[in-house]
């Protein structure tokens, strides 16, 4: 099963779950309808939330105070529940992604995609891209409803991209030290507040992944747009933890207290260009 097919499986699970709850209710109300309990708790550094299968409980870190981040975390852990309920899918993921950090990486990506779909359905994002093209500048419009999580909108923008691209959400602070097993040697030791990657996403056709908690250098366009509180277009390297100097056209911007970036490994198509049938 390809990664694109796995994404489709998770979207199907999410669509089926969404059909069982009325529109307009909060994430907490929605997941409780599936017999889950929600509580705040003290979680390890770097953990916004956790799903406890045996007690069917979602624990959200008490340090997460942002409403949009709490909503995203709630739905992210709910998708963990949906995937765990599918024994065949969960076993496939364990068997196929058995290397160090691989299972954690793919399950976190799939749960982010599922959470984004619950917050802002892809049909809305695709309609905007088809009408006006692909650009990071769509982000504020996608978040015109204040309860829409901007990270969810960024993930959906990248998920619906008609080309190969990468997207990141960054925030400033000391990056958490709890990182996936097998990656500790690659992670620089944080000693002071820095701009770092909080969430990452890549389009279904992308070949590589971007590691969470990667620190952005001060001269990166993402850091510049964060400092200047603006949108910047230019050419910049994709922020792989390896430091690979793959420079591509990109857009970066500051929005709602975080930095956002999209990196176009292949240029997005022009929406005015006639399509071949």
Image (cartoon, rainbow, N blue to C red):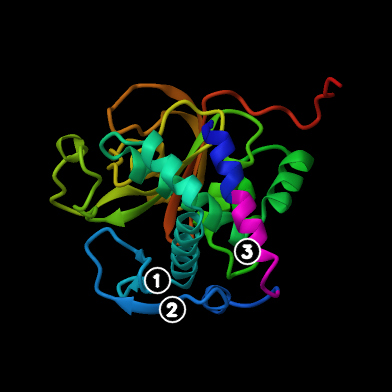
Q: Residue furthest front?
A: 88
Q: Position of residue 268 (x, y in %)?
A: 64, 29
Q: CA distance from mark 1 to mark 3?
A: 17 Å
Label 2: how many Cα within 10 Å (few below 14, some 14–19, many 20+): some
The structure residue drawn at horizontal position 50% and vertical position 30%, both measured from the top left corner, is 234
Labels 2 and 1 touching (C-beta < 8 A): yes
Q: Nearer the viewer, residue 112 or 89?
A: 89
What whole-number distance in Å separates the C-alpha atoms at marks 2 and 1? 6 Å
Residue located 45% across and 58% down the image:
80
- Residue 17 got which mark? 3
Q: Tell me the residue that label 2 is attached to.
A: 37
Question: Which quadrant of the figure has residue 4?
Answer: top right
**The one of 149 and 173 positioned closer to us in this rendering:** 149
Q: Is residue 126 left or right of residue 228?
A: right
Stretch in magenta: 11-22
The label number, if any, that marks residue 58 in the structure image = 1
Distance in Å between CA atoms under marks 3 and 2? 16 Å
Label 1 sits on a secondary structure element that is: strand
Which label's residue is closer to the chain start, 3 or 2? 3
């Amino acid at each position: 099963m390809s990664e694109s097919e796995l994404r489709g499986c998770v979207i199907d699970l999410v669509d089926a779950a969404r059909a069982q709850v009325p529109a307009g209710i909060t994430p907490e109300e929605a997941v409780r309808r599936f017999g889950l309990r929600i509580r705040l708790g003290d979680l390890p550094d770097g953990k916004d939330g956790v799903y406890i299968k045996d007690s069917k409980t979602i624990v959200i870190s008490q340090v997460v105070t942002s409403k949009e981040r709490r909503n995203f975390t709630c739905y992210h852990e709910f998708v963990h529940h949906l995937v765990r309920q599918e024994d065949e899918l969960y076993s496939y993921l364990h068997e196929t992604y058995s290397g160090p950090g691989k299972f954690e990486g793919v399950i976190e990506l799939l749960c982010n995609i599922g959470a984004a779909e619950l917050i802002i359905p892809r049909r809305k994002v695709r309609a905007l891209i088809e009408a006006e093209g692909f650009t990071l500048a769509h982000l504020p419009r996608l978040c015109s409803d204040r309860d829409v999580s901007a990270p969810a909108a960024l993930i959906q923008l990248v998920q619906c991209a008609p080309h190969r691209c990468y997207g990141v959400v960054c925030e400033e602070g000391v990056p958490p030290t709890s990182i996936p097993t097998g990656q500790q040697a690659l992670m620089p030791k944080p000693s002071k507040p820095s701009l770092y990657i909080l969430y990452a996403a890549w389009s279904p056709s992308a070949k590589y992944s971007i590691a969470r908690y990667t620190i952005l250098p001060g001269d990166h366009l993402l850091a510049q747009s964060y400092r200047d509180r603006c949108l910047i277009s230019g050419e910049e390297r994709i922020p792989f933890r390896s430091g690979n100097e793959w420079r591509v056209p990109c857009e970066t911007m500051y929005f709602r207290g975080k930095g956002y970036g999209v990196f176009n490994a292949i240029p997005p198509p022009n929406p005015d260009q006639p399509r071949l049938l």
